[in-house]
Amino acid sequence: MDLIVFEDEHLLVINKPAGWNTHSPAPFAGEGLYEWLKNRRHRWSGLAIIHRLDKETSGLLVFGKTPAANRSLTQQFGRRQVAKKYIFLTDRKPASRKWRARSALVRAGDKYASLPPRAGAPSAETLFEATGAHVDDCTVVEAVPLTGKTHQIRVHAAASGCPVLGDVLYGGAPAPRLCLHAAQLQFEHPATSQPVSFSVPPDFKADARLALRTAIIDPSLTDAFRLIHGAADGWPGLYVDRLGEDLLARTDAALTEPQRRRVEQLGARTVYHQRLQRGERPPPQWLSGAPATKEIVVRENGLRFALRLDEGSSTGLFLDQRDNRRRLLERYVGPGFEIAPAPEVLNAFAYTCGFSVCAAAGGGRVTSVDLSKNYLAWGRRNFLLNGLDPSGHQFIFGDAFDWFRRLAKKKRLFDVIILDPPTFSRSRESGVFRAETGYGALTAAALPLLKAGGILLASTNAAGLAPEDFVEAVTGAISRSGRSVTCRQYAPQPPDFPIERDEPAHLKSVWLRVD
């Protein structure tokens, strides 16, 4: 599905996928659509939320891009001058072809109750029409909300005896998604005062989880991303990555028959499988499709990276860091937080130099440090794949803590320092490092190399380190060093790694400008 329906210098109209919050529900939760947009493009940095859709509702959302547009749209919504039409499915037979629902909506725990209108309680009003069309055995109903209350259509539909399919909160039959879609919006353009109308039909039969991926991933730029993320995508214990034309499935044990069928439904040239286990994981094994290959070249944000399937626990690119790499590439972290042109960058745990490639492609000169000569050689190959001359950058073999001291003696200073260490490592020079207990010391060791006003990207996927404790470890080390943070941006994992109660966030990242 296409995410952007319309854009000019005043408006941005979006077709929101089902399963994505309009805005983030909590400081360390995944980005909502609003935050994802603002933190993605400079031209969207001033976006304002004008109205909202429930997480599981798909369809049209309009954002204002200028203060004048924000005022105009807010007034139009407030005065009920915006015409909205929703479409939903119900497996119940409506009592009438057309009907009107009017009631007071009162919070009742985690949902709302529809009560008779009464003094002092604002009423909500919705017009309904059964269109006569059907999807499978379900009736297609149009709903026009004359007011704009939370859960209004869902509550009124349920109170009318035809709850929305998939809306189990209000008595609807279970379904793969909530079958409610914001199909039409009409209002006055804030600059021209001319009427504008937008319409996007629903596709209730499409896989909502795949629709979210197609909405955020441009296949001409990126063909490596997460397709199934465990319990958050309805498949506990199953993780599937798209790697170009191939798929990599990961599970704790052998694939079950339902898991195998689901993976095969996704379509791929070759399917690989890897067992998840503590410690060093075995390399992926060929499962089905074309004969296995040792190397796959994938695209991410227009850049190319070599992945290898015979190198042990990781294939060479951590896909959950895609948005952080893009921030380096485009030198845009978020509103009011940009990276200066031609930065000097230190990538302290370079691995296969994914961050380094993006920093270099964005105009930076990069020093990459890693404890593996093999990974650094792999990193040079990634540079060459993107037409970047490795000789213009530094690749240093050795322990990061040791090289922090050496570089400090040489009075080297950097505009950007990237800290993305393994959760556990051991070196002859520095001994054992554990991210859960050692991140503060790591930050303190790197700070002497960061210029005043420089940027620190600190990241970890240590499961035992809560986001707030991780941020405190980093910022506390900065404070104890006598320096201060002037700009901060917390960056959760991207939307193709959705965060749910049953699938909590694993990646924690924070961007900091340090005086």
Image (cartoon, rainbow, N blue to C red):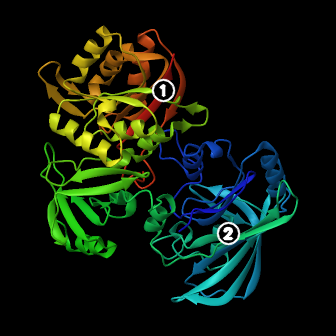
Spatial CA span between label 1 and label 2 = 42 Å
Query: In screen coordinates, is 427 left or right of 153?
Result: left
x and y, in percent, of residue 59 in the image: 62, 66
Query: In screen coordinates, is 297 left or right of 415?
Result: left
Q: Looking at the image, which residue is at 51% across and 62% down?
A: 215
Query: In screen coordinates, is 282 left or right of 180?
Result: left
- In the foreground, 171 or 73: 73
Seen in the picture, residue 329 relative to 100 is either above or below; the reply is: above
Task: Mark 2: give few (<14), some (14-19) or many (20+) Cα within 10 Å.
Answer: many
The quarter of the picture where residue 367 lies is top left
**Which amino acid does the dot numbered 2 rest on?**
Ile
- Residue labelled with disc 2: 153
Seen in the picture, residue 9 relative to 426 is either above or below; the reply is: below
- In the foreground, 329 or 141: 329
The quarter of the picture where residue 396 lies is top left
Q: Are marks 1 and 2 in contact (CB under 8 Å)?
A: no
x and y, in percent, of residue 93 in the image: 61, 88
Kindly tell me whether residue 83 is visible in this rendering. no
Q: Looking at the image, which residue is at 19% across and 53% down?
A: 276
- Residue labelled with disc 1: 512
Q: Nearer the viewer, mark 1 or mark 2?
A: 1
